[in-house]
Amino acid sequence: MKKYRDHYFKLAKQENYPARSVYKLKEMDKSFHLFSPGQNVLELGASPGSWTLFAAERVGAKGRVLAVDLNPANTSFPSHVIYLEEDVFDRSERFQALLDEQAPFAIVMSDMAPKTSGIKFKDQALSLELVEEALALARTCLIQGGSFVVKIFEGPDVHAYTMGLRSLFDKVKTFKPKSSRAESKEIFIVGLGFLGESAAKAEK
């Protein structure tokens, strides 16, 4: 069994985050200046809540974070966070109502990942389904000028997906955080400056 109690694991415990994944988002925020006070944020794949806590800190009490995952977080969140146990592919009336109420969002971010099978191409295909659904949501509820952050497994579909984002965002960057484990196949794609509904419709 590999020892995952590395520097970032220990740091997360010291700083009261439930998982080391928070440092990936911190790196992206430092590089791309994603968050500002007062923003509304939609987070997909939120459990156990490290990204949620960091986003809530950065947007402050005047901001809002709507965090969604199939699994419970078992984490205490501040009052400006709403955490839902929901399936993004089968949204309940409550989920849709909250989306409508809190949109548009300044940031849509997804740390969703499939349950891996160990079969490389199957896992890549499952990851692609998740990032496509994340983008479909972003296209409907991102504010013009907003940002999109999504995790994807490295594979043959990454290039085409990234190129598809270029017609929707002013800038598109790929990012491999230093805090990602060396053996991890995950990368993040960051879209900055959403061009708005007209661009999204034109791209269809």
Image (cartoon, grey):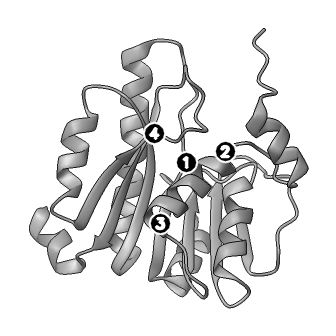
Among numbered discs 4 and 2, the one appearing first in the sequence: 2
Among numbered discs 2 and 1, the one appearing first in the sequence: 2
Tell me which amino acid carries mark 3: Val
Residue that carries the numbered disc 1 in the rendered image: 111
Tell me which amino acid carries mark 4: Lys
- Left/right placement of residue 117 relative to residue 56 reads left
Q: Secondary structure at mark 4?
A: loop
**Of 169 and 135, the residue lying toward us:** 169
* Residue 102 position within the rendered picture, expressed as x and y whole percent measured from the top left: 55, 84
For the residues labelled 3 and 4, say whether their Cβ atoms are less than 8 Å apart: no
Q: Secondary structure at mark 3?
A: strand
Q: Secondary structure at mark 2?
A: loop
Residue at horizontal 76%, vertical 24%?
A: 4
Q: Is residue 123 above or below residue 139?
A: above
Q: Which mark is residue 21?
A: 2
Residue that carries the numbered disc 3 in the rendered image: 108
In the picture as drawn, the residue positioned furthest to the left comes out as 202
